[in-house]
Image: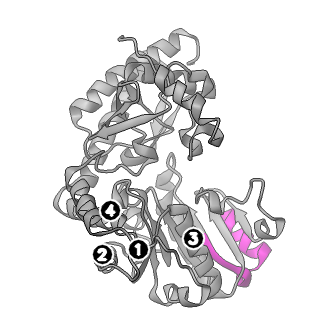
Amino acid sequence: MTQRRVDQSWALYDRAITVTPMGTQTHSKAPRDALRGSEPCFLQRGSGCRVWDVDGNEYIDFRCALGPITLGYSIPEVNDAVARQLTDGVVFSYAHPLEIDVAERLVDIIPCAESVRFLKTGGEAMAATHRLARGFTRRDHILTCGYHGWINNMDRLGVPAAMSSVYRALPWGDIEPFEAAFADIGGDLIAAVSVACSYGDIELGHTFLAELRALTERHGALLIYDEIVTGFRLARAGAQEYFGVTPDLAVFAKGMSNGVPLSAYMGRRDVMEKVRDVVISSTFGGDALGLAAAKAVMTIYEREDVIGTMWARGRRLHAGIHAHAADLDVAVSVDGLPAVGELQLPAAEARLAFEGECLRRGVILYSVLYPNFSHADSDIDEALVVIGDALAAVQSRGLLA
């Protein structure tokens, strides 16, 4: 194994924490002290399925920027579209024609989309759907399932009790807690059920989402899908395409523009028109760079089998990991579907050690494994050699049963 050094990364991190809490803008990107000396704190560039840190180390990446990189890093067609738009301008005093172009494409692609509006981040757009649901139904309560971004996270410090009292978080895959909540709170007080798919047991969605659809319709509540990750990854139109259950509202982000900041909230026209009254408005909602990227991304998806390729690479990756686990007789697996598989290890200590061993060998993993369109079979096979060696190393330390 070639010795890798990440000294410059950690020097930058030590500098960063003097001016930035946690040294990063994203909690999931914060380096772990236990991996000092092996984890790269700062990545500098990417190409295809590979990234390079500030020390010059190369990695095959399965974090993919926490999911947005569906095509690969630095895709020329997307880069060129953004560069061309940059020469014309980014934001203007009135709307830009790209707002129409991209909205029309989304209406064509997404089953629930009769009307579309744009923002910059997925969490912000989810908050917009919650506001719309309340304005449309004139009800206050939201039942949530899964993580919808920090804005909508009600179980942390800084959230007034009055606000958290009108949210109730419930588990994925079981309709009974939702039925009980409608009975407890009152069906005429619940504005919406807002759901993001779980990954490891995502296939429960075939029955669960249909049951949620029936439940919300029975009580006049809206059904909202968080398609921030599943959109343009699980299927082009996300969970609503894969499971065949159409919500009233949905949010797409991340893969829609291959990582260039952009989000969209969309759905029934009558609900979306309430934006006039509830007032959801942002200076950067019509940022032309993100829209130019999204238009280019959608063109590639129309021309290439991006979804099929990601699924095929995911299957190859999952099968290889399972083969290594069987050979070593260790409790390691990948649960869920190939495009969004959830890596399972027996304990947090084992996961940390495993990720560290992979990093030292040039592979970046995450709790969710995100293949992208640029991963070739050869990249998967190269990564699997690393993963096998890393599992053996962790097993030799007595951390895998």
First in residue order: circle 2 vs circle 4: 2
First in residue order: circle 3 vs circle 1: 3
Image-based side of 74 in relation to 54, left or right: left
First in residue order: circle 3 vs circle 2: 2
First in residue order: circle 2 vs circle 1: 2
Tag 2 residue: 98
Residue count near mark 2 (Cα–Cα under 10 Å), binned few <14, some 14–19, many ≥20: some
Inspect this view and state whether residue 347 appears: no
Disc 3 vs disc 2: Cβ atoms closer than 8 Å? no
Residue found at x 45% / y 79%:
267
**Closer to viewer: mark 3 or mark 2:** 2
Locate residue 104, reporting x and y percent: 30, 79
**Closer to viewer: mark 4 or mark 3:** 4
Magenta portion: prevailing SS class: helix
Residue count near mark 3 (Cα–Cα under 10 Å), binned few <14, some 14–19, many ≥20: many
Tag 3 residue: 212
Tell me how far mark 2 sits from mark 4, CA to CA.
20 Å
Tag 1 residue: 286
Q: Start and end of the magenta stretch?
A: 176-193
**Disc number at residue 236?**
4
**Disc number at residue 213?**
none
Q: Amino acid at mark 2?
A: Leu
